[in-house]
Image (cartoon, rainbow, N blue to C red):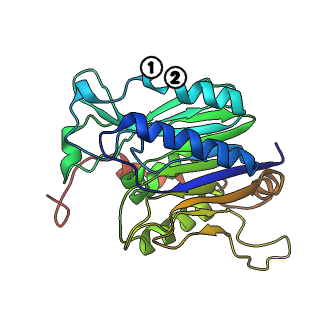
Amino acid sequence: MKFLNIAILQMRSRNREMEPNISTIIEKMKEAKSNHADLLLLPECFITGYDLTIGNESALTQEDLLPLCEKAKELQIGVVATAITQGDEKPQNAAFVIGKNGEILMKYAKVHTCDFADEKALVSGDEFKVCDFGGVKLGMMICYDREYPESARILMLKGAEIILVPNDCESMKPRVQALSTRAYENMCGVAMANPNGRNAGNSCAFSPICWDENGECTDNTLLLADAETEGLFYAAFDMESLRSYREREMLGNTFRKVRAYAPLLDGKVEYPFVR
């Protein structure tokens, strides 16, 4: 795949209305396909709405994804489907990568749940995952995951070439800047979908290519939406150029000194971070 063309949906879904939200996704899949997209990326929890009063019995099951799987196969377009999903005892905040043939390539459960807020009622995931999408290695992190640079770093170490970020939050300027940095330091492409709204939106995509072969700085911004426009935005990742850059430059996993990183595995929390 020379280019990976991602359609990024900037839109707020309807809380606790899965059928209308799935219908909206199908319409957006059709629109994205007509614009030659390979993959549709949704904001966080789009199918169920980001409503943390949803109990485990009302959360999404994998069977609920069947209409999206069928439509993906029919249209030959992938989709990142997001929802509050059923867990063993409590629900999870999860994203599914559905391939162009309708198969579920990966389920990722949000690792960094917002335990300072309503997400403390969820079960967090315990693994960052990567899947193969038509020859492109896709990683996933959801919203608050991106506040921790370790999330993207682990995805890079697992082989991710493009990191997808379903998101639902406000005050986006520093978060957008951080995503550009995650692309730069890991030599991975990054794409983020956020619902539109006042102080929200700003769906974005960044290439990891921050300078050319002559060392001249380049703008790595592929997309930066405004706050309030609703609809699809598009970002095209040149995979040949991205891979060439990763082969010759000195970031990512090239010269890390892991012997100095032991404190990263110490879970002790001290002042001023005790909550």
The quarter of the picture where residue 68 lies is top right
Residue 148 locus on image (x, y percent): 40, 56
Asked if residue 13 can be seen in this view, the reply is yes
Are the residues at dot 2 and dot 1 in contact (C-beta closer than 8 Å)?
A: yes
Q: Which amino acid does the dot numbered 1 rest on?
A: Glu
* Element on which disc 2 rests: helix
Do we see residue 160 in this rendering? Answer: no
Identify the residue shown where x is 67% and y is 33%.
132
Count of labels shown?
Answer: 2
Q: Which residue is drawn at 47% across and 37% down?
A: 22
Residue nearest the observer in this picture, 17 or 136: 17
Q: Is mark 1 on a helix, strand or loop?
A: helix
Residue 205 in picture, x, y percent from top left: 61, 62
Q: Left of 135 or right of it: where is 214?
A: right
| Closer-to-camera residue (6/128) | 6
Foreground: 128 or 71?
71
Q: Name the residue under label 1.
A: 63
Q: Residues within 10 Å of mark 2 (few under 14, many from 20)?
A: some
Residue 27 lies, with reference to residue 212, above or below; the image says above
Q: Check disc 2 and report the residue beneath it.
A: 66
- Figure check: 203 above or below 15: below
Amino acid type assigned to the residue bearing label 2 in the image? Leu
Separation of disc 2 and disc 1 at Cα?
6 Å
